[in-house]
Structures are given as C-alpha cells and as structure tokens.
Image (cartoon, rainbow, N blue to C red):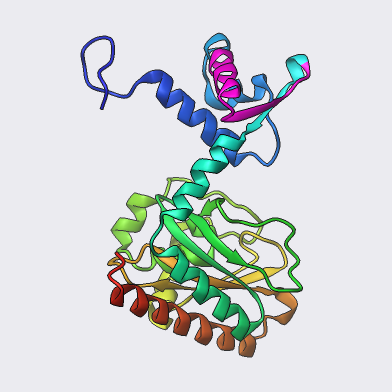
Amino acid sequence: MAETGDGARGPVKSAERTVQIMEVLSASPERLTLGQLQERTGYPRSSLYALLRTLVGLKWIEVEEGGEAAGFGIGPRALLCGTAYLDRDPALPYAVRQIEQLRADVGYTTHYARLDGSNVIYLATREATDSRRLTSRVGRQLPAHATALGKALLAELTAREVDGLLPERLDALTPHTVTRRPELREELERTRTRGWALESEQNTPGLCCVAAAVPYRIPATDAISCSIPLDHATDQEIERVAEAVSRHAAALARTLRRDGIR
C-alpha cells in the first residue's frame, strides 16, 4: 500500500476515487452527468470534475459534451485493459471450446463466468443462432444470488462463507429474484444435492438458466451455464440441458487439471 500524507499506510485517495468512478460508469447502462456521478460517489464536485477531465484526456472515459448535461461513459482504454485480462487467462481458451460444444449439443446460448466477490463476471458467451439477446454479457457482472452461475458457485461454499460473501441486502433484478436468505439457502442446498443450479427469470425476463461449477479449483471459482427460453423450459428439457451442462463442466475440469491450469 502507498503512504498517505500523514505517514500512515493506506489507500491513495485520488486512486481510490478514480477506481470508483470507473466502476460506477461501467455499471451504468447509459452515460452519467457530473451531477449523477457526484450523487453516486459522494465526491466534492470540484475534485470529481478534475478527475473526470484527466480520465477523458487519457481516454479512459469519454464525454458527450452538453454543458451541465454532459454525459460521461467508459472509454476505449478501459476496453483494452479488459481485453488484456481475457487474453491472459489460461483457462479461457479451453472454456470457449467447451461452451461451443455445449451449444452444439443443446442448441441454446451458453456462458462461462467467474465468481468475483458477491458477483459473477461473464468471461465468454456463445449465442444460439436464434438468440433473443441483443448485446453480449462478456465483461459484465451480475449479483451471484440472482444467477444460476452464481448459485452453482455459492453452493461450493459453506453457509457461513456465503453469508460472509454476500451483501447484507440482496437486490432484486426482477420480481422473481430471490432476496430472502432462507429461500436462497434452500436453493443452494438443492443445488448441492443435484449437482447443478437452476433459476427462472431471476435476472432476465423470459429466460431460465441451468449452471454447473467447473471444479478444477477447490472451491470452484468458475462455472458454465445454458440459457433456455421460458417457453421451451419443460421439466424434461431442463433435465436434458442439466445433464449436458454437468457433463461439459466435468469435462472442462478434467482438461484444465490435465494441462496444469490452476
């Protein structure tokens, strides 16, 4: 850690603020004004504006000019860093091949994601040819408690570890999102028992999702999943997809362990 002005060890305030600005912008589906950023970060307006202009100059963020209504958003430098993370991940090329094979087997959109704190980050997606999704989820994060991917990975942890990992308040992404801890614990226990996770419209209306952890690490940090349109999600179809997801997750884990990927 760097030293602060009083000689004590701690975070550098400007660096900490810069990171939070980037995280707030990346989480927003639209550009944010100076006023909106100030409201979400709580930073003084003058220092916030100075940081924003610096980041714009360095191309980490972009601005759509409009006076007080100017909108700030993520810039191309941020994309380059995100791409570098994907390029250097040793497990990702194997995972991409595996979810492509899974898509060929089941005919639906498939995903590969990693647990990051209380969220899952999507590292790869292979869309079905008739996919209803218009934008890729790669590089995005969603709350673990609201996704099958997240539930599959939370089920790898003890109840105490789950409670310590998740925030006190579980936000609802849709009216179907599980936000009560007793209900979430029941879902995780069902996941442990059958070996795969299931959620229905908990983060995306019209879709249910089946996921299984990839146990090449202990506890597992990665999982693969398959999204099924709700009008196709009969019990029989869910069982068929769950068997395929579990089989491909196990195959990927064997391959990664064989090749020394940790």
**Whether residue 179 is situated above or below residue 37 in the rendered picture:** below
Q: Report x, y in % for residue 32.
A: 68, 29
Residue located at (21% from left, 12% from top): 7
Q: Report x, y in % for residue 112.
A: 51, 65
Q: Report x, y in % for residue 103.
A: 61, 78
Foreground of the two, 170 or 81: 81
Foreground of the two, 168 or 94: 94
Residue located at (42% from left, 19% from top): 14
Q: Is residue 143 visible?
A: yes
Question: Does the magenta-highlighted stretch encompass residue 56?
Answer: yes
Q: Report x, y in % for residue 195.
A: 41, 80
The region drawn magenta spans: 48-66
Residue 10, picture quadrant = top left
- Specify whether 223 is left or right of 239: left
Quadrant position of the C terminus in the picture: bottom left
- Specify whether 217 is left or right of 45: left
